[in-house]
Image (cartoon, grey):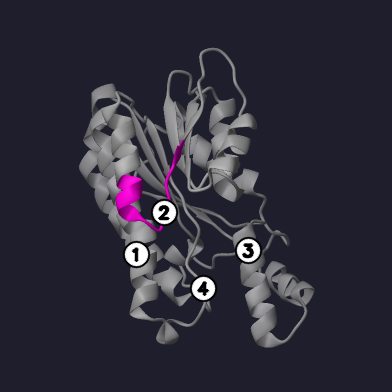
Amino acid sequence: MNLNLSGKTALVGGSTQGIGLASAKELASMGASVVLLARNEEKLKKAISELSVSGDQSHSYLVADYSKTDEVKRVVNDWISAGNTAHILVNNTGGPPAGPVHQASIEEFMNAFNAHLVNNHNLAQAVIPGMKEAGFGRIINIISTSVKIPLKGLGVSNTIRGAVANWSKTLSNEVGAFNITVNNVLPGATETERLTGIIENKASKGNVEKSDVAAKMTAEIPMGRFAQPEEVANAVAFLASPAASYINGINVPVDGGRTGSL
């Protein structure tokens, strides 16, 4: 099985922590040169130091705030204009705040739409021409299992994640002929800051202990535990590899079997 990414460059969003950082590390371990994209330069510098280097790899970072779509677009387009090519794009950023959908404001929807779908679209548009020229492209969107079954208490997230998944499927149909694949990784409950925030929110609203909330959540997972970021990153890395050359336009849940549908 060919998992070698030597000579390839991967642009990874939200890559200073959690699933984004774990994905960047795994791609680097497979030989890719990794470009980290996030808003905190100090954290980016630290993350760069954690990436493995072998051969002619060269890691770097770009500073941009995902809440500012024009900034993300400008920073990445400037990087492309400087003669760079991203063979792999990992679209990833933090999820919207929790809450019931009927209480969500229009501003919350628009903020989430911009942070996820608009940024994903701008980034894809920036890198696709280089992928076409290279004859190799992988676009991997880290979304959520709510694409398959909406999750209780995550109204805005459920809505926007569904939009991103349909955008992704449409894009996969359009660029597949250029040897560019577009796929979605759907993490279940994963031990990240995002999960910590969800547990704290549920505990506060229900006036219960955080440990009780966590226990109830893990009881819904057939494997009986939360995922580690590295386990989600393994799925990202496989889809980025030459071995996944004929996998296109699919959703890959990484959730320990929790999602109650195929």
Q: Earlier in the sequence, mark 1 or mark 2?
A: 2
Give x and y (percent) for residue 49: 63, 30
Labels 4 and 3 touching (C-beta < 8 A): no
For discs 4 and 3, the disc positioned in front in the rendered view: 3
Q: Residue at x 77, y 76 (%)?
A: 212
43 magenta-colored: no
194 vs 78, left or right, is right
Query: Which residue carries the number 4 mark?
Result: 151
Answer whether residue 189 is visible to the viewer in this image. no
Give x and y (percent) for residue 80: 30, 31
Residue count near mark 4 (Cα–Cα under 10 Å), binned few <14, some 14–19, many ≥20: some
How far, Cα to Cα, is label 1 from label 2?
11 Å
How far, Cα to Cα, is label 3 from label 2?
19 Å
Query: Which residue carries the number 2 mark?
Result: 66
In front here: 44 or 30?
44
Q: Which residues are magenta?
A: 62-73
Q: Label for residue 113?
A: 1
